[in-house]
Image (cartoon, helix red, strand yellow):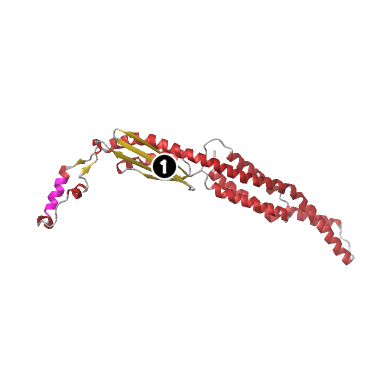
């Protein structure tokens, strides 16, 4: 199944006075790359969430943002009075404070390290956060995958159009290829007759046949046409797959092989019509290469 690498999904939930929200976005990337932004007190869940994202998404630059808004009294931090008193005691000994030049500011004091303590121990916070975030992450990724799948269908349609163009041109090349040697044979015979008549000489048939055989060998594109045809079959098979295994990297590789065979045909065939068909094939391959960069 063809899926794009760009997508978006989100999910939200309210429970016990807390509002949870998760948003997932993804963009093109050759590999998988995760950027996870969690509330400071839930940073310990980052590795678990990245592992889940990696399990469900194979490629792309994925950004996940999670927020939690507490509206209950349980959200209140606890003031560490002993730490606060220690700070105040030390600050009062400062000359500027003792002389009344600087006043103690409660807001600043509360920001000092250790003065405000989270409302619960770390393990309990992580357990609560894990229970709240896990289903939201799953739902958000479901939405992202759904969007990727829709865009993937459009990518597949475009890739199949280019595949069909290459297939049609390749069949025309297959039909035209045998005439190349025949036309060369006719031209060679005509040229030899003209030259020999002018010089009043005679050419051995074996020499002419040898020359034609050498030319036929140099311009034979049967193997390249066969390989290009097989690559197209593989390409079509990838586009018709129904499982969720990623195919983007395989498409990248196949695009290189398609271009290699097309270049070889172009270099070996002197026929103008075949050359024009190859130019169209190479243009389609470039469009496939561009679109394949978006495929997971």
In front here: 67 or 216?
A: 67
Seen as rendered, the residue at the extreme left is 99
How busy is the neighbourhood of tag 1: few (under 14 within 10 Å), some, or many (20 plus)? many
In front here: 285 or 33?
A: 285
* Residue 246 visible somewhere in the drawing: no
List x then y, in percent, for residue 185.
81, 55
* Overall secondary structure of the magenta section: helix
Asked if residue 251 lies left or right of residue 172, the reply is left
In front here: 138 or 268?
A: 138
| Residue in view at x 59 percent, y 44 percent | 159
Asked if residue 13 lies left or right of residue 251, the reply is left
| Range of magenta residues | 84-93
- When asked about the image quadrant of residue 67, the answer is top left
| Residue in view at x 48 percent, y 38 percent | 146
Q: Is residue 62 magenta?
A: no
User: Compared with residue 94, is residue 11 higher up or lower down, i.e. above or below?
Assistant: above
* Residue 180 visible somewhere in the drawing: yes
- When asked about the image quadrant of residue 243, the answer is top right
| Residue in view at x 21 percent, y 43 percent | 116
Q: Give SS at disc 1.
A: strand
Asked if residue 283 lies left or right of residue 87, the reply is right
List x then y, in percent, for residue 276.
69, 54
List x then y, in percent, for residue 23.
39, 41
The image shows a total of numbered marks equal to: 1
User: Compared with residue 98, is residue 16 higher up or lower down, i.e. above or below?
Assistant: above
Seen as rendered, the residue at the extreme bottom is 199
Q: Quadrant of the N terminus?
A: top right
Seen as rendered, the residue at the extreme top is 16
User: Compared with residue 201, is residue 26 higher up or lower down, i.e. above or below?
Assistant: above
Residue at the disc numbered 1: 24
């Amino acid at each position: 199944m063809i899926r794009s690498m760009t997508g978006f999904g989100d999910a939200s939930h309210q429970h016990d006075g807390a509002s949870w929200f998760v948003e997932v976005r993804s963009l093109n990337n050759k590999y998988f790359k995760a950027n996870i932004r969690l509330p400071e007190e839930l940073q310990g869940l980052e590795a678990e969430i990245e592992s889940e994202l990696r399990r469900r998404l194979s490629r792309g630059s994925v950004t996940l943002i999670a927020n939690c808004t507490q509206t209950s009294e349980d959200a209140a931090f606890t003031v560490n009075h002993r730490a606060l008193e220690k700070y105040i005691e030390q600050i009062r000994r400062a000359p500027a404070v003792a002389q009344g030049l600087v006043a103690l500011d409660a807001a600043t004091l509360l920001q000092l390290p250790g003065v405000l303590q989270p409302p619960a121990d770390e393990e309990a916070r992580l357990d609560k956060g894990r229970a709240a975030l896990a289903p939201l992450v799953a739902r958000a990724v479901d939405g992202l995958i759904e969007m990727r799948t829709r865009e993937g269908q459009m990518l597949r349609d475009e890739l199949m159009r280019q595949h069909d163009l290459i297939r049609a041109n390749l069949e025309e090349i297959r039909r035209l290829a045998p005439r190349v040697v025949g036309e060369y044979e006719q031209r060679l015979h005509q040229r030899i007759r003209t030259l020999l008549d002018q010089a009043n000489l005679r050419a051995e048939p074996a020499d002419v046949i040898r020359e034609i055989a050498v030319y036929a060998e140099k311009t034979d594109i049967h193997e390249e046409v066969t390989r290009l045809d097989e690559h197209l079959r593989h390409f079509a098979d990838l586009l018709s797959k129904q499982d969720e295994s990623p195919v983007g990297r395989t498409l990248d590789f196949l695009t290189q092989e398609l271009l290699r065979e097309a270049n070889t045909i172009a270099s070996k065939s002197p026929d103008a019509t075949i050359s024009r068909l190859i130019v169209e094939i190479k243009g389609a391959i470039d469009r496939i290469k561009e679109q394949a960069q978006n495929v997971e």
